[in-house]
Amino acid sequence: MKSVQTRFGKLAYIGQLTGKPVIIAVHGLGGAADYFQALRPYLTQYDVLAFNLLGTPPSTAAKDDIYTVESAAASLWAAIDVLAIKTPLILMGHSLGGSVVTAMLAQRAAQVQSLILISTSTSGQYIHLNPLLKLLGYPLISPVLQNIMKLAKRHLTYSPFLDPAKVAEPSFLVEPMIQKNRRVIKQELTLFARYTTAVPMAQRLSLYSKVPVLVIFGDHDELATDQGRLNDQRHYSKLPQVTFVTVPQASHLVLVEKPAAVSALVNKFLGNAAPMKK
């Protein structure tokens, strides 16, 4: 992976700048830049830069004692500044990464062309998180669980996030959680709750009036849950600038399971998304 040094620390990323329109891709809780690799062959008309957030090796840990969605967003803008990217950006976030790119939009709307949210919930009310993940934040339990995850990657990590039979070699999905520091995991586990508590839903949704927005969910997303997805759809349907799409037979990791379908939606959206007045 390449890396860029910022005032927040080192941020690792995959991809390169060749002069095409730029997509900045941001992973979610427990994820990494590799989650977007399956999309890249279908998005050849774009320069896709997928970042490892601070705390996700080989990116450095966040310097702040309290890591927030807003500071994650600011660190990405700092990386973009160092890379001297001047063109309007397409921001893509998966799960928690969708909250990060939403915060990026709040910080610098003038530099954003459009927003793509994949499996990003509007509220934590209906989210069903595996209780085992919470144990990764505890000092004595964390190393034991991480060792178990190394030995039983397929069984412990993927369900209920995706059907491993749909992915040729899904072991890369668990690597970030094995590599991360316990303190980082503990911070990450509360990021979404802290962000949605600090920034009211009405304020977050109002940001989506600034640019065209594509929202993608899998119809078998057991983390967001059916009730949560339908609740999100109700909220998003009130916003005329938001396009909401459900991918059939796909889970929370729809971008890994159905990269061709997700990329087709992205390409169609970006082809039709007219720039909005700032």
Image (cartoon, rainbow, N blue to C red):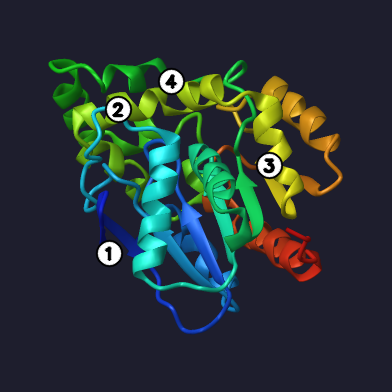
Of badges 3 and 1, the one in the foreground is 3
Q: Amino acid at mark 2?
A: Ile
Q: Return the x and y of residue 265 as percentages of the image width and height.
A: 72, 59
Residue at the image position 34 percent from the left and 62 percent from the top: 13
Pointer 4 or 2: first along the chain: 2
How many angstroms separate mark 2 from mark 1 (CA)? Answer: 22 Å
Total number of numbered discs in the rendering: 4
The residue to which callout 1 is attached is 4
- Taking the image as shown, residue 194 lies to the left or right of residue 20, namely left
Of badges 4 and 2, the one in the foreground is 2
Q: Which mark is residue 121?
A: none
How many angstroms separate mark 1 from mark 4 (CA)? Answer: 33 Å
Pointer 2 or 1: first along the chain: 1
Q: Return the x and y of residue 231 as percentages of the image width and height.
A: 75, 24
State whether residue 210 is above or below residue 276: above
Which quadrant does the N terminus fall into?
A: bottom left
State whether residue 139 is above or below residue 155: above
The residue to which callout 4 is attached is 130
Q: Residues within 10 Å of mark 2 (few under 14, many from 20)?
A: few
How many angstroms separate mark 3 from mark 4 (CA)? Answer: 30 Å
Residue at the image position 46 percent from the left and 84 percent from the top: 18
Q: Amino acid at mark 1?
A: Val
Q: Return the x and y of residue 245 as percentages of the image width and height.
A: 76, 46
Pointer 2 or 3: first along the chain: 2
Of badges 3 and 4, the one in the foreground is 3
How many angstroms separate mark 3 from mark 1 (CA)? Answer: 28 Å
The residue to which callout 3 is attached is 207
